[in-house]
Image (cartoon, grey):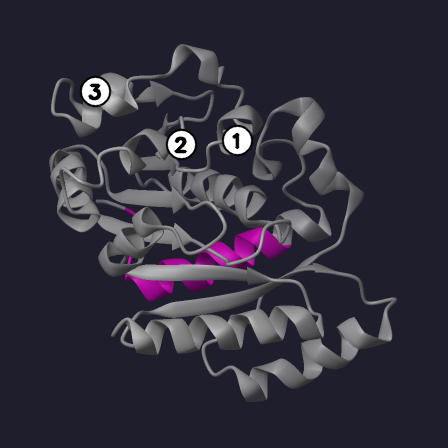
Amino acid sequence: MKTLALFNLKGGVGKTVSAVNLAALASASGLKTLLWDLDPQGSAAWYLGVDTDEIGGMKRLARGKTTIGELIRQTGVSRLDLVAGGLSSLHLEAAQADHASLLARLTEPLSEEYHLLIYDCPAGLQAINEAVLGQADAVAMPMIPTSLSVHTYEVFLRYLSKRRLSGLKLYPFLTQVDRRRRLHRDLVEALPAQIQTLLEATVPYASVVEQMGPRRLPLPLFAPKTTAGQAYAALWSELADALSHRRPG
């Protein structure tokens, strides 16, 4: 089982939308996929039409009183399952268990069932995020093409170096790109030379992405041929190559 984390220090950059769409595309490619919605807001679950009120037990999970399998829910997307309900309850267990070893224990059984585990991480430098970053085979980092986003990326690189995580496979990609704006156009052109691992696919600012909320569906299920839909397909293709994933035989 491979693991992909969607992460950014900042919120509002398209992280959850990207996690949901990438999970849907991964499952459509034939990979049995589990999306773990780590954000306490439960937005990924919302986009997938899963009622988070039905999902609980994270504290019992951390204490070993239940299994992660009991918290997994099916979605309306074939081959895509979900674990929801943020890990705020796991923060309460910090004194009892190291986050990294706890996460390893929780996810170890999943490899028997899934090809891919995608984490939708909450914004910020929480202890559980550091555990995820240390475990992930690749980290996809959505960035809006602004100077502040570039600064945030540089801050994150310094954090990785300080925490001895500089070997992390980090793949930034641009989201909410509005080519009517000169700064966006300039950064789309300039950033590939500055960020060697920047993915080529750029996700446009598009009203169709906002329709994921009212429809409670991933973009590939209702608008795959739109510019945004095709951008996410291209993005998944690049990340699939990075993860060395191929359609299971």
Nearer the N terminus, badge 1 or badge 2?
A: 1
Q: CA distance from mark 3 to mark 2?
A: 13 Å
Can residue 45 be seen at all in this image of the molecule? yes
- Within-10-Å neighbours for mark 2: few <14, some 14–19, many 20+: many
Secondary element under disc 2, as helix, strand or loop, is loop
Q: Magenta region: which residues?
A: 231-247
Please give the residue where the numbered disc 1 appears in the rendered image: 41
Q: Is residue 89 left or right of residue 201?
A: left
Please give the residue where the numbered disc 3 appears in the rendered image: 60
Please give the residue where the numbered disc 2 appears in the rendered image: 86
Q: Do labels 1 and 2 touch, CB within 8 Å?
A: yes
Residue drawn at x 14%, y 41% is: 97
Q: Is residue 104 left or right of residue 191?
A: left
Looking at the rendering, in which quadrant would you find the C terminus? top left
Name which residue type carries label 2: Gly
Spot occupied by residue 124 in the image (x, y as percentages of width and height): 47, 54
